[in-house]
Image (cartoon, coloured by chain):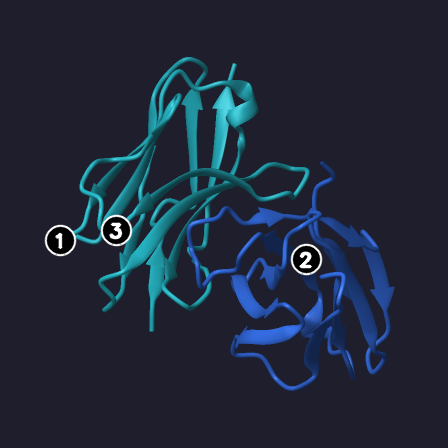
Chain colours: A blue, B cyan
């Protein structure tokens, strides 16, 4: 069974640009969560999607948005990039979502975004 | 708001020895889960062990076990017979019902040969 796939693995963007990151969950999983990991702030929850609906949202500005498609693949978009958006972005998939809490969340290897 | 604290930024242990990583958390909820995740240099977060708050028995997974003290809101991870492959960042995390993971800042563990 293939794991969680995040593309691209590495990305360099310029301030002011926008970026789209992709996450393909494990086959059959319907929940995808996104996290930002930085040395200063650690791991912070961005949002969770379940069956194409946003279930929860973390404390991030509106420049951060996401969506989930009918095949459960999810994209995360960051507009008007700032230097502080440089981070490792991780996504996690689970079969039933955090509401159930009895299933394991599987993480991808992340996308390393550098904003210059 | 839920918070998770890991007071040991870095630790080291000799191969085959035992090490304990500390974690404390703060929540007002009664129904929650606690986790330890491992992040090796490959960056992929891997679940090590998890504990349901309503269970008094400490979770165990092979060489990994936890000491869950609910009243003290403490959730430490013990790694027995440490192996070189255990070298990684270890994150303690809490999950409230219907919400999402709150992670601690992590502990960098080095297993020395």
Classify 10 Å Cα crowding around label 1: few (below 14), some (14-19), many (20 and above).
few
Return the chain for callout 3: B
Labelled disc at residue B53 = 3
Q: How many numbered circles does the render carry?
A: 3
Labelled disc at residue A88 = 2
Quadrant, the N terminus of chain A? top right
Tell me residue A112's x, y (percent): 75, 56
In the rendered view, tell whether residue A2 sits above or below residue A115. above
In the rendered view, tell whether residue A24 sits above or below residue B111. below
Check disc 3 and report its element: helix, strand or loop.
loop
Q: Are marks 3 and 1 on the same chain?
A: yes
Kindly give the residue lying farthest to the left in the view shown: B71
Return the chain for callout 1: B
Q: Residue at x 70, y 42 (%)?
A: A3
Quadrant, the C terminus of chain A? bottom right
The residue pinned by badge 1 equals B71
Using residue A107 as the reference point, say whether residue B62 is left or right of it: left
Tell me residue A24's x, y (percent): 75, 55
Tell me residue B54's x, y (percent): 22, 50
Q: Residue at x 67, y 50 (%)?
A: A28
Q: Residue at x 54, y 74 (%)?
A: A55
Calculate the distance from the C-alpha at mark 3 to the C-alpha at mark 2: 30 Å
Tell me residue B25's x, y (percent): 29, 57
| Quadrant of the rendered image containing residue B95 | bottom left
Closer to the eye: label 3 or 2: 3
Circles 3 and 2: CB distance less than 8 Å? no
Q: Are marks 3 and 2 on the same chain?
A: no
């Amino acid at each position: 069974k293939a794991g969680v796939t995040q593309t691209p693995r590495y990305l360099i963007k310029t301030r002011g640009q926008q970026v789209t990151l992709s996450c393909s969950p494990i086959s059959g999983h319907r929940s995808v969560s996104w996290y930002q990991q930085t040395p200063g702030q650690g791991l912070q929850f961005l949002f969770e999607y379940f069956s194409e609906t946003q279930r929860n949202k973390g404390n991030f500005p509106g420049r951060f948005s996401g969506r989930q498609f009918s095949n459960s693949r999810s994209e995360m978009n960051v507009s008007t990039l700032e230097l502080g958006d440089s981070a490792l972005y991780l996504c996690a998939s689970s079969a039933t979502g955090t509401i159930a809490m009895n299933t394991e969340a599987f993480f991808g290897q992340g996308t390393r975004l550098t904003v210059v | 708001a839920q918070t998770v604290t890991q007071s040991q930024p870095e630790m080291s242990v000799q191969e085959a020895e035992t090490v304990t990583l500390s974690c404390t958390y703060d929540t007002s909820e009664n129904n929650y889960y606690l986790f330890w995740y491992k992040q090796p240099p490959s960056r992929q977060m891997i679940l090590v062990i998890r504990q349901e708050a309503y269970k008094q028995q400490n979770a165990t997974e092979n060489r990994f076990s936890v000491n869950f003290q609910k009243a003290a809101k403490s959730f430490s991870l013990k790694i027995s017979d440490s192996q070189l492959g255990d070298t990684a960042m270890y994150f303690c995390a809490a999950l409230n019902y219907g919400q999402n993971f709150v992670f601690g800042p992590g502990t960098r563990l080095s297993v020395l040969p």
